[in-house]
Image (cartoon, rainbow, N blue to C red):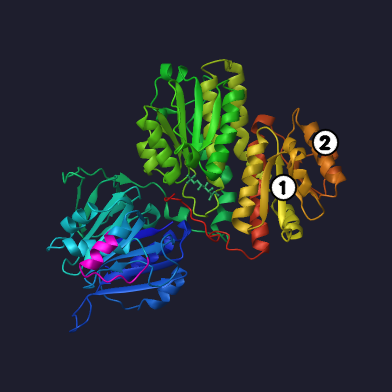
Amino acid sequence: MCGIVGYTGPRQASRILVEGLKRLEYRGYDSAGIAVLKGGPIAAGERPLVVIKRKGKIAELRKAVPKDLAGSSGIGHTRWATHGSVTDANAHPHTDVSGKIAIVHNGIIENYVPLKEMLEKEGAVFLSETDSEVIAHLVAYHYDGDLESALKAALGHMRGTYGIAAMHADEPGRIVGARNGSPLVLGVGDGEMLLASDVTALLAHTTNVVYLNDGEVVSMTPTDFRISDRDDQAVDPRIDQITWKLGAIEKGRFSCFMEKEIFEQPESIERALTGRLDMEYGSAKLGGLNLAKKDLHAIERVRVIAAGTSWHAGLVGCQLLESVARLPAQAELASELRYRNPVVEAHSLYLAVSQSGETADTLYAMREIQRRGGAVLGICNVVGSTIARESDGGIYVHSGPEIAVASTKAFTSQLAAFYLLTLSLARMHDMSHHEGERFLEELKAAPEAVRRSLQQRDHIQAIAKRYARFHDFLFLGRGLLYPIALEGALKLKEISYIHAEGYASGEIKHGPIALISPETPSLFLVPNDHLREKTITNMKEIKARGGPIIAVAQEGDDLVASIADEYIPVPAVDSLFQPFVMVPPLQLFAYFCALELGRDVDQPRNLAKSVTVE
Ligand code: AGP
């Protein structure tokens, strides 16, 4: 969603801001802008703050920013429209009437209507339809020579969520930021400071970062910064190191990030497993859980809270926990749970699963559980993200930065985390040492099995070329492969805009079969266990009604190959580990369909990488 970058230091701010915004493109946006405090002499009548905003891509903004724009401090923003349409005027930064104050804002100011009415009575003139513009006028209303106190006073009026960066022409070199429910991270450079909503915008300049907490305000100059909390008390900053390498946020030899991330999966799964396989005890080592053995042993049930792809990983995880660790487990949609007045049971373990660690629905559901006394562990990718910091412990999945909006490598790393957790809990109960060792052997082999599954690339591309112009698809799976079918359908929808529904294969007779015709292909995930024959029966039912079939099944399955119109073989692995090998073909199918249709694979329309508003 929206992104923020701020810079103050000796260098040309406009370049750093535009380049930083470019790094945030992946979050999803529809317009962008910067405000720079002009360097050099200011002519009479000239405004000291240069504000340039454009709807559309960063390339439009880049064209509009003069190459020689002087000025070494500024703020920038990518906007994902919520209040007001996509126009230059609604893009950020917003300024006050004097033009001396500029602000950028992520989040939503819920009470902006009465604030706007109050400010208009005080003489403010609004130039946009946004909720965010009230912040500029509120800061002006309170400004008395000190931007930090004016912003703090303005925050006192506001209800909602925000990550804000603000500057004032009379305080050159100072940028003030505030956070409440929308991430902000400070980059501490050598003689320069940066502020961003996401570390990817900082990585080219520094690896020293300070994550702001909700309620904190930072005031920074090129050589110094100060953080204070809601009570105006100074906060002792903790400087963290970002371990991601710059190369990880660049496309390299791939045509887009999604392609790169799909093919990175053998390594990213490997990273999720590294150091966590306890060969000696046939178990898993998960130090980050922060739970004593006896607390882990006392867990009676597990509940997962997540959204989208992370929820699909949770659905797989819950089946594993139930069938292998013999714990009742249920995956809940965070957006539902948070408003449902949930019963928080003793001896339940809650798991908040999130790639970004910033998804508003998951974060608020987690807080609601914690407020009721429940313990929540996080399964996150982004180190230092809000969910990772606010959870009571957890598992980092270490997939590295995931830039494409459609999640791929984070999903398989989340799966890896669930397999590890399942093993760890199962070994506390019924699973023997020997069974644990066998489980570990299969898990260790997962990266290589995924690598082999990805070798179907060209075959899948050829199939995608034939099928990309169909308008509707069914994705069908059973057992552990049912959530994988949901994930495959979501991938296809997200990036190709083809309508696709995921169903449990056994459910099609209960309604969806009415959709079957030569125009509606079904993509079957065929398990290699006791559910295989039942799935084949379902395939025949579709076939009898003229529906085209694409089947993903274990290599050498001649029967499936003879029934299906298209057959995608995947490596033979134990049925418990089939989710790993089944998902890459679906990711590739979605990717090649999207390519075939000329879609913007990395930044599909209307979507944002991290959904920080409801
Ligand atoms: C995945 O392809 C989607 N873009 C989306 O469903 C995503 O998984 C969801 O918004 C949750 O995000 P999170 O994992 O960062 O919490």
Q: Check if residue 118 falls in the magenta segment.
A: yes
Look at the image and give the residue range highlighted in magenta: 115-129
Task: Say which of 139 and 535 sits in front.
Answer: 139
Residue 474 got which mark? 1
573 to 129, vertically: above or below: above
Considering the image in quadrants, where does the N terminus appear? bottom left
Residue 395, visible in the rendered structure: no
Can you see residue 436? yes
Q: Quadrant of residue 382?
A: top left
Q: Residue furthest left?
A: 145
Give the crowd class for mark 2: few <14, some 14-19, many >=20 residues within 10 Å. few
Picture coordinates of residue 536, whole percent (x, y): 81, 37
Mark 1 or mark 2: which comes first in sequence?
1
Amino acid type indicated by mark 2: Thr
**In this rendering, position of residue 221 left or right of residue 107:** left
Cα distance, mark 1 to mark 2?
A: 16 Å
Is 364 situated above or below 592?
A: above
The percent position of residue 220, horizontal first and vertical second, equals 21, 57
Badge 1: how crowded within 10 Å, few (<14), some, or many (20+)? Answer: many
Q: Position of residue 427 (x, y in %)?
A: 54, 19
Residue pictured at 40% horizontal, 67% vertical: 32
Q: Is residue 67 left or right of residue 470?
A: left
Residue 558 versus residue 262 in the image, above or below: above
Taking depth in this image into account, of 521 and 220 the one nearest to the observer is 521
Q: Is residue 391 magenta?
A: no
Identified at 32% across, 67% down, the residue is 93
**Mark 2 highlights which residue?**
537
Q: Is residue 268 left or right of residue 464?
A: left
Q: Give the residue type at disc 1.
A: Leu
